[in-house]
Amino acid sequence: MRPTAPLFRRIRRLALTTKMVNGGYYKGTGSGSMGEHTKHGGYRIKIEKVRTYVVPEGLRNFKLTPFVTKNMQPLKGDFEGDPKGGLSGERYLERWKKENGMD
């Protein structure tokens, strides 16, 4: 049984997986190596293989900005003096009873 022509075109656009091809295909993760293994079981990092990112000059004065504001204040939880904060089991049960009634 073969798929119809429109379905077959859609299948061909999907990413290639190791199950779609014969042996010897290894997709990998795209991470790359940063060094080499030593004969004693260690790992030696080669600085020339480590990825480094250079920040462009004048980035602070750049006119385009990300979609996140820089003036956002951190939100504080309201736990009314509970020493355990938001992780308190007693606080959870108290709030559950208040919102759902006594059970």
Image: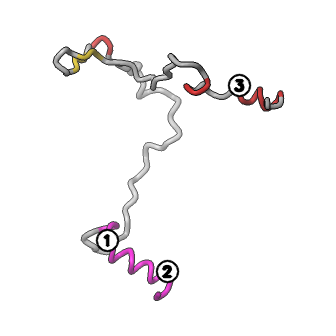
> Going by the image, does 61 lie left or right of 87?
right
Amino acid on which the number 2 mark rests in the picture: Glu
In the rendered view of the protein, which quadrant contains the N terminus?
A: top right
Q: Nearer the viewer, residue 35 or 22?
A: 22
Label 1 sits on residue:
88
Assess whether residue 97 is covered by the magenta stretch: yes
Residue 21 lies in what quarter of the image?
top right
* Residue 12, horizontal then vertical, whole percent: 71, 25
Q: Count how many numbered circles sit on residues in the image.
A: 3
Q: Earlier in the sequence, mark 3 or mark 1?
A: 3
Residue 54 seen anywhere in this rendered image of the structure: no
The image position of residue 64, as x and y in percent, is 53, 30
Please identify the residue farthest to the front as the structure is shown: 1
Q: Residues within 10 Å of mark 3 (few under 14, many from 20)?
A: few
Q: Residue, x 55% and y 25% (percent of image)? A: 18
Local packing at callout 1 (Cα closer than 10 Å; few below 14, some 14-19, many 20+) is few
List the residue tagged with mark 2: 99
- Highlighted range, magenta: 85-103
Report how far apart the C-alphas of labels 3 and 1 lie in the structure. 52 Å
